């Protein structure tokens, strides 16, 4: 793969803004999930509802943004002079880290036998959420090397110990399994599959469009009644569901930034918006719209909506240069992984010491919705402080 001169040294603030907004909404809806008496349009739709809400768009938006960032990330490493070995090592480490964190998060909330565990499940969950911070923190250059290794390898040892302290519900066995990969794990698989293909085809636009078609076809085949795929193929097709969104992000990113566009309107992007919606609605009678089932209609409609949102931000920020408003969301954009796991650290800490910070009044209805909004804003300001003191997770 060669350096792409069109992408050279560009800072796309609209991508950062979309990432920051997505993370903010994600924190809001995650906190909202614990609030009772919330309208259905503010919750995930049931698996068989054949519908989606804005909540069902958060996960696909994050996958889409991961894809949009891939061409720039690879180009930056090539400009830096990294060898293919260095690039692949970094890619595999990032994907593995997402899988590890995702699986630990899943097992912190379900699948354990609390009566047989040596430590309380809440303490186990607190440590599982906390340890990624010292392990994957991006330490400043003037930070003590010795202390850095103590924190990193100490955190790794704690995670290993947590594995052996876990007792499975029902079987009583020590250790845990990937009951499912968790949100971060699913992102890890989709990222790994997409970037491997991106590298093999040298980021060619036509090849990425072909892969997008393959992802949709595999996703559809995997959900077609009466069609039983071999176990290994079903596993790959399942993860191609989410790779669809990463690949869609790559395609849209290339259409915006890997070609010279003289016209004020990006017609190829508009064409893909129409295509995403057309194919999504065409497949809807066969598979429905469902985030839980991961249907092709859900992925394609989500890709279409994300493309529209990005196009608007691109016009507003890159063309009209209206960027001041986005500063509110940038702390989240700069530290997305930490702001994702920090609420879990707080939750399990409070649970472990039986601390109730928020009165029950703020866990129901409108007061609960307002609290979720306030909590999300607080998290942004916390991230601003963390970023200032160089506490940033970097996979």
Image (cartoon, rainbow, N blue to C red):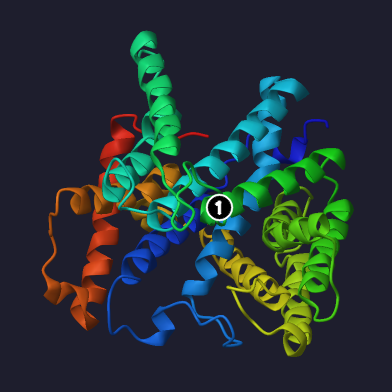
Is residue 98 found left or right of 258 in the rendered image? left
Q: Please say whether residue 381 is visible from this viewpoint.
A: no
| Residue 289 locus on image (x, y percent) | 64, 82
Q: Residue at x 67, y 70 (%)?
A: 299
Asked if residue 155 is positioned above or below residue 51 in the image, the reply reads above
Q: Residue at x 78, y 76 (%)?
A: 275
Asked if residue 160 is positioned above or below residue 267 in the image, the reply reads above
Instruction: Sort mark 1 into few (<14), some (14-19) or many (20+) by Cα contacts within 10 Å.
Output: many
Q: Quadrant location of residue 391?
A: top left
Asked if residue 173 is positioned above or below residue 377 in the image, the reply reads above
Q: Quadrant location of residue 218?
A: bottom right
Is residue 240 found left or right of 63 in the rendered image? right
Q: Residue at x 78, y 86 (%)?
A: 282
In the picture, the quarter occupied by the N terminus is: top right
Is residue 54 found left or right of 308 in the rendered image? left
Q: Residue at x 37, y 34 (%)?
A: 131
Q: Nearer the viewer, residue 112 or 241?
A: 112
Helix, strand or loop at mark 1: helix
């Amino acid at each position: 793969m060669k350096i792409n001169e069109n992408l050279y040294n560009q800072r796309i603030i609209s991508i950062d803004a979309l990432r920051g907004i997505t993370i903010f909404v994600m924190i809001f809806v995650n906190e909202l999930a614990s609030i009772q008496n919330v309208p259905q349009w503010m919750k995930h739709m049931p698996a068989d509802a054949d519908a989606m809400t804005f909540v069902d768009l958060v996960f696909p938006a994050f996958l889409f943004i991961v894809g949009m960032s891939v061409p720039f990330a690879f180009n930056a490493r090539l400009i830096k002079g990294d060898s293919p070995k260095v690039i692949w090592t970094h890619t595999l480490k990032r994907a593995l880290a997402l899988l590890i964190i995702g699986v630990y998060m899943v097992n912190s909330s379900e699948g354990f036998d609390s009566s047989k565990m040596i430590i309380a499940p809440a303490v186990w969950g607190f440590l599982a959420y906390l340890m990624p911070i010292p392990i994957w923190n991006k330490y400043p250059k003037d930070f003590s090397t010795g202390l850095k290794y103590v924190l990193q390898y100490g955190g790794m040892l704690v995670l290993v110990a947590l594995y052996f302290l876990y007792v499975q519900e029902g079987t009583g066995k020590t250790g845990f399994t990937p009951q499912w990969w968790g949100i971060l794990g699913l992102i890890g698989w989709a990222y790994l599959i997409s970037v491997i293909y991106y590298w093999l085809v040298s980021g060619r636009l036509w090849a990425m469009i072909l892969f997008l078609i393959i992802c949709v076809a595999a996703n559809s085949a995997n959900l077609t009644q009466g069609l039983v795929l071999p176990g290994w193929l079903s596993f790959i097709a399942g993860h191609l569901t989410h790779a669809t969104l990463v690949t869609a992000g790559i395609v849209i990113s290339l259409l915006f930034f890997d070609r010279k566009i003289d016209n004020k309107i990006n017609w190829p992007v508009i064409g893909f918006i129409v295509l995403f919606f057309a194919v999504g609605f065409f497949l809807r009678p066969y598979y429905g719209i469902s985030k839980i089932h991961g249907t092709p209609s859900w992925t394609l409609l989500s890709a279409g909506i994300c493309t529209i949102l990005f196009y608007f931000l691109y016009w507003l920020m890159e063309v009209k240069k209206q960027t001041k408003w986005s500063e509110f969301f940038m702390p989240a954009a700069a530290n997305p992984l930490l702001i994702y796991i920090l609420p879990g650290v707080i939750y399990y800490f409070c649970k472990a010491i039986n601390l109730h910070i928020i009165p029950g009044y703020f866990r129901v209805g409108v007061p609960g919705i307002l609290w979720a909004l306030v909590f999300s804003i607080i998290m942004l300001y916390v991230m601003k402080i963390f970023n200032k003191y160089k506490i940033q997770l970097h996979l």
